[in-house]
Image (cartoon, grey):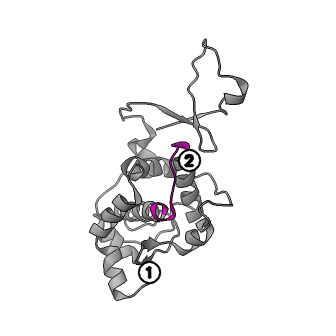
Amino acid sequence: MKRQPPAARSTLDIAYWFQSRSDSAGEVLTQRKLHFLLYLTQAHYTAEHEGQKMMPATFLATEAGPLEPNIYQLFESGYFKVKGNEPSFAIETYLHEIWARYGKRTAKQLEAIVARDSVWRETLMRGSMLEIPLELMFSAYGGGGVALPLNQRQGAGRDRQVKEQEYWTPSGKRAQKWVPGTPRPPADDQPEKTCRRT
């Protein structure tokens, strides 16, 4: 592992992305599910990128699972009152990969996955509210392998077969595809300018 700055500037940006993505899918993002998604994102990313953090997050081991204390405080009411910054295209591509892998699972299913890695439980056995070491995440998720740089990943859709193309507005809401030559939806249902993402 080598010392590197986090890929994303803020943990809030990643958490807000998951909230927007969940909203656009018509799903409710609970506090527990959000923390499991953040933890799994950090664990997979650090394992694939020589120990580099995806976000400047600190995860504490609690009885409820890994917890990022700053996000916990901001999300305590069940919804962020502040808005995160748009992640870079490369980071968003990685987040889409994490969402595709874990987004449809319940908090209970994510808890089972995180429990199997033994990192959270191992840290919790040493004491509640201790930081979960990045080095343990790195090892538990297969760290040391060679991963493609973010800007070369297939998540951008160049080489991936996509069953159903989804369209999203810059604010993270799902948009309707419009084909030139067909009537547009009524003005109040008309989507914002869309960005094509996979």
Quarter of the image for the N terminus: give it: bottom left
In magenta, the rendered stretch is 24-34
- Amino acid found under the numbered disc labelled 1: Glu
Residue behind mark 1: 131
Q: Are marks 2 and 1 in contact (CB under 8 Å)?
A: no
- As drawn, 198 above or below 120: above
Which of discs 2 and 1 lies nearer the camera? The answer is 2
> Hey, which quadrant is residue 83 in on the image?
bottom right
The residue tagged with tag 2: helix, strand or loop?
helix
Residue 193 visible (yes or no): yes
Residue at 39% from the left image edge and 68% from the top image edge: 51
Residue found farthest to the top = 181
Residue 77 is left or right of residue 151, and the answer is right
User: x, y percentage for residue 180?
Assistant: 60, 15
Residue at 42% from the left image edge and 43% from the top image edge: 155
| Mark 1: few/some/many CA within 10 Å (<14, 14-19, 20+) | some
- Is 32 in the magenta? yes
In front of the other: 132 or 93: 132
User: x, y percentage for residue 5?
Assistant: 51, 68
Residue behind mark 2: 23
Residue 10 visible (yes or no): no
